[in-house]
Image (tube, rainbow, N blue to C red):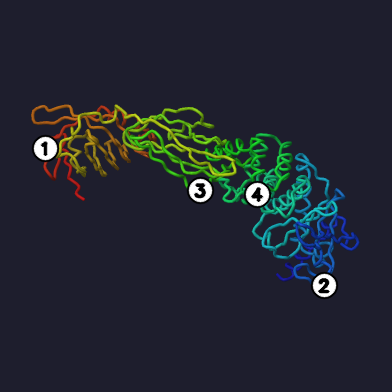
Amino acid sequence: MARRKLILAFFLLLVANLAAQDYEVSTCEEMGLHPIIPASEDGPRVDLLENYYVPNAAGVGGLGCWTYHHPNGRDFVVTPHGWGNPANTPKRKQLIDEAMEAITDARALYITYGNMDHDLYYVLNDVDYGVPGHTMWVTNGECWMISGVPGLAADDTPGERKFVFAHEVGHCFVMENVLNLGKKYDELNAWFDESVSEFLASDVYETVDREIESAREFNVERPFRKKYAAYSLFEYFVKERGKADLVPFLNKLTTTFDIKERLRFMRELDFDQLAHNYLYEYRRDRLKDRGTSRILPKVPLTEAREIVLDPGLNEEPLPELWMLRLERINIQIPEGFNAKIRPVTGSDKTFFQSIMVRDGASYHNWDSEIYVEGDCFTEQSLELMISHINEDPLEDLKLSYELEARTDCCSGLEGSMEGCMVGTWEVDISTISHLLDYDVSGTLKVTFENVPAGRLDASFDLRFDFDNGDYDTHKGSVSACVLPLGRAGLLNYFQLSGVALGAGNVHTHFYSRKGKFLDLTDDVIEGLNRYKFNYTSCTPDILTVLYFVQMARVRE
């Protein structure tokens, strides 16, 4: 066994050594590599390869380094002296190959967005930098990047590692094409520097999906400090405006390092409209990963506000709304009302708004009155979305509306439900079988009340079993108006109307011979809306309906 392992290890090392000869290799000294970034307002002097010229420096394996030449003759992968020439393990050889492939793939795509004239140097070593990759500044027409093996440990597939390498090449692209970037203003620029690099890498490797880990509802808690999360915003930007607009947009932003000026430029370039469109699409689950079509996950960073419309008013003030984030406001229409709702007003600053209604209707860039039909028994919910790019929060905004009572909601005489019936009752299921030709099992609870006319609310979990093996299942809840029909002798008659089934109700019939289920929901609604019943007797504890069915009062 030991002999087999020795042969296998020798074979793997031989394969790695043979493959390593695919690249021309020089020492760093032979290449004259000693890149130095001079001290400036962006930071102190940096000697990029200083550790490689110091004996036994941690993580680089000794004095000197190797330079692997990319076939294009202008890009390079740099490794520690201790990694050997050729690379002395299959894993190290694989990392060199992956870095070379990523450089090839990234350079080929990025030139469709702008210039890629700088030579690229990717340093690999065993130092733990705490991040998968890092890009250092451009010096003498060269862009230097670095990754330590410990930092790449979480990226355990070749695709994920190449994505990291392509992301760092994306930084080189940004630094070359955005002329006034300046490290001094890194915090101000990081939101687009990191996000554009992440987007570019996702454009190179569409199916890796590493960037989805950064997907968030884009929001700036402090102006322009949010990293990575805007990658999908820039993907949307390129989709809507094209590749040619990306670099000019970034250059326009960096002509000033004053936040207010940048906001003004963004408004001039209609970025506020584009950002609202993006946020609307994001909220509607319409943004998908291009490679795998996965819907980008919604991770909201702000809680939705809530407003309940008051029948006695026709205007509601809104809280102040911050810039460049999606402000969501849940508008509740009270049960029993319809509503006319008008777009938000009150500011002379530019802002954008869209609204979504419960039934799926939506109004993108909402600009005119809408009529929303309410519900007899539950509140109707709408989601208002507002965004803007102004220097200060929007204030003094207001939502105007008109509520009108529905005329078809339990419109009988006030107090038409007799006092004895009012309350909650548990049905004795065994008594139902007296009326039917099949077995009934489960639970049924019914509440009668005056609101102000008669109303019924019921919850149920029932099964009807037939002799032929078929069965019906009814599970969920229902609300309805209870209309008095008058008396006939000793009996009091009522009819249900305005029936509304609860969300998630189940009403099915199972055909045992066919092994299939039939949805009975429409039949149930139609049948209940015509349903008439009587009660025979009512005591404080027992209500008898339809001659035989008994209910026991539920007391709290």
Q: Is residue 105 visible?
A: no
Query: Which is more toward the observer, 292 or 493?
Result: 493
Query: Which is more toward the observer, 336 or 513?
Result: 336
**Mark 2: which secondary structure?**
loop
In terms of sequence position, does the residue under pointer 2 or pointer 1 come before the other?
A: 2
In terms of sequence position, does the residue under pointer 2 or pointer 4 come before the other?
A: 2
CA separation, marks 3 and 1?
55 Å
CA separation, marks 1 and 4?
72 Å
Instruction: Say which residue label 3 marks.
Output: 302
- Residue 64 on image: x %, y %: 85, 67
CA separation, marks 2 and 1?
101 Å
**Mark 3: which secondary structure?**
loop
Query: Which is more toward the observer, 132 or 319?
Result: 319
Q: Nearer the viewer, mark 3 or mark 1?
A: 3
Instruction: Say which residue label 2 marks.
Output: 55
> Which residue is the extreme one toward the right?
30
With 325 as the anchor, is 161 left or right in this view?
right
With 304 as the anchor, is 443 left or right in this view?
left
Instruction: Say which residue label 1 marks.
Output: 537
In the figure, residue 199 lies in which quadrant?
top right
Q: Which kind of residue does numbered mark 2 sit on?
A: Pro
Q: Which mark is residue 191?
A: 4
In the figure, residue 205 lies in which quadrant?
top right
- Residue 519 on image: x %, y %: 37, 33
Q: Is residue 340 visible?
A: yes
